[in-house]
Amino acid sequence: MERLAKRIAGYPPEGVRAAKRAVNDLTLADAAQVRSDAAMFQGLIALPDTRERLDYLAARGLQTPGETERDLGRAVAEFHR
């Protein structure tokens, strides 16, 4: 990784900026899409079913180093009402 960074640093800054801009233009969502996705997420995260699942996962160590984070799929599958 360091070798690649040094190689990129050797190119003219204008060219690096242009390449970054081109990649971003091709791969990043526009601001309206980001806002729309954020609004949808906020609506979904507020649902009682979602809160129940998050509370379950948080009690088992969600967002802390450990088994739940290492195997989130299993932890989600183990959720039962």
Image: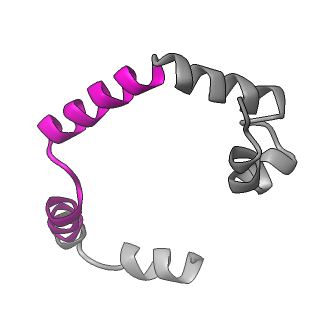
Residue closest to the eye, 52 or 16: 52
| 58 relative position to 9: left or right | right
Q: Residue at x 23, y 55 (%)?
A: 28
Vertical order, 37 against 49 (above or below)? below
Residue 15 spot, x, y in % from top left? 18, 73
In terms of image quadrants, where is residue 35?
top left
| 78 relative position to 44: left or right | right
In terms of image quadrants, where is residue 79?
top right
Residue closest to the eye, 9 or 45: 45
Toward the front, the furthest residue is 81
Q: Main secondary structure of the magenta part?
A: helix
Residue 77 spot, x, y in % from top left? 70, 50
Residue closest to the eye, 12 or 36: 36
Residue 62 spot, x, y in % from top left? 74, 36
Colour pattern of the rendering = one colour
Q: Residue at x 17, y 40 (%)?
A: 33
Q: How many marks can you see?
A: 0
Q: Residue at x 21, y 68 (%)?
A: 23
Magenta part of the chain: 18-45
| 41 relative position to 12: left or right | right
Q: Is residue 79 magenta?
A: no
- The quarter in which the N terminus is drawn is bottom right
Q: Residue at x 86, y 50 (%)?
A: 67
- The quarter in which the C terminus is drawn is top right
Vertical order, 48 against 50 (above or below)? above
Vertical order, 18 against 58 (above or below)? below
